[in-house]
Image: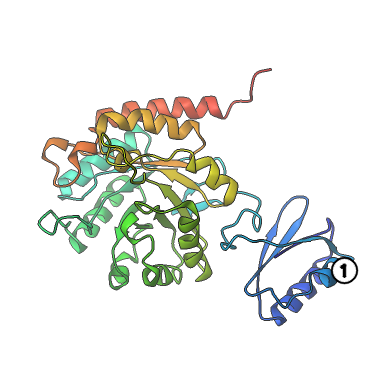
Amino acid sequence: MIVVLKHGTPDDKRDQLIEWIKGQGLDVHMSIGKNQTILGMVGDTGSIDKDLIACLDIVDSVKTVTDPFKLCNRKFHPAPSVVNVSGVPIGAGNFAMIAGPCSVESEEQIIEVAKAVKAAGANLLRGGAFKPRTSPYDFQGLKADGLELLKIARKETGLPIVSEVMGAEQLPLFEDIDMIQIGARNMQNFNLLREIGKLNKPILLKRGLSNTLKELLMSAEYIMAGGNEQVVLCERGIRTFSDYTRNTLDLAAVPMLHKLTHLPVIVDPSHSTGMSDLVCPMAVAAAACGADGLMIEVHNDPMHALCDGAQSLKPEDYADVARKVFAIRNIMTQPAAI
């Protein structure tokens, strides 16, 4: 249930209403806009008399929200949210270019890639230290050593770093990581999501391999219900009957998620296609359909990469993609010609 207050409502009367709602055993999420203030009630609102609240002189309207996700719902928070990752804003017109190797392999490799992607326009560095692999015999990442190498690359370039956590027991190792990624396989690891919700740190939440948008938003709700509202959603492709690409990139999810939630939405064209020559057209399409950023895998030697070399771009190819993406972004942000 949401309560829309009349424009110009005094703060003291607003606060009195908030205290009354909390006294009913509910939490209140307040969103202050230019023309109105919205109070979102979180919890079991079954005992709340909607008509009683509606008749208050400070209340413009009372609406029931039937969606199971509340805190990430755009009805609760009409304005788009901005998630700040160590000085890099994402959302509400702020575009994130996240790039780097699927897996950190050496100090030389991660620093070389970090410098290259920064020169091409990337503002965040990604790199896997803990790798969830389908086969137990595949390279599983350098783990804690990989995180330390990412920190060295951050010091060399100034780029904030993004890396994936696989379990709650690993979280102490991520205290100095700028943004924690929750991978597709862990999207519904609810115990991990609850622990992530206790942190004061930006979270990149990837859509699961076969999950609906509602399920993605409910996973975001787990994190936000714990108190951490710094969540960025990532569309990374879903499994369908396609037999030529690794996954099917659901670009329609981007505008739909923007309709449903105030959280930023980025796209990963690397994992969604699994093919380096499809990354550029999908990245450009993602920028055109309103994504708040891109996560692209870049490796200085894809042929010999220890993980996902087939979908990784060479630094010079990433620079070309970045130029095209920025060109599309420039077009999309221009006023429409009459």
Q: Position of residue 241 (x, y in %)?
A: 32, 41
Q: Position of residue 245 (x, y in %)?
A: 28, 36
Residue 306 vertical position relative to residue 251 in the rendered view, above or below: below
Of the pair 289 and 330, the residue shown nearer to us: 289
Circle 1 SS class: loop
Residue 294 vertical position relative to residue 262 in the rendered view, above or below: above
User: Which part of the image, by quadrant, shows the N terminus?
Assistant: bottom right
Type of amino acid under label 1: Leu
Instruction: Give the side of residue 156 with respect to residue 286, left or right.
Output: left
Of the pair 89 and 297, the residue shown nearer to us: 297
User: Is residue 94 visible from the viewing direction of this image?
Assistant: no
- Give the residue at x 45% y 51%: 233
Q: Position of residue 97 (x, y in %)?
A: 40, 40
Which quadrant of the structure image shows residue 192?
bottom left
Instruction: Give the side of residue 138 with respect to residue 196, left or right.
Output: left
User: Which part of the image, by quadrant, shows the C terminus?
Assistant: top right
- Give the residue at x 39% y 26%: 323
Question: What crowding class fits label 1: few (fewer than 14 Cα within 10 Å), some (14-19), or many (20 or more)?
Answer: few
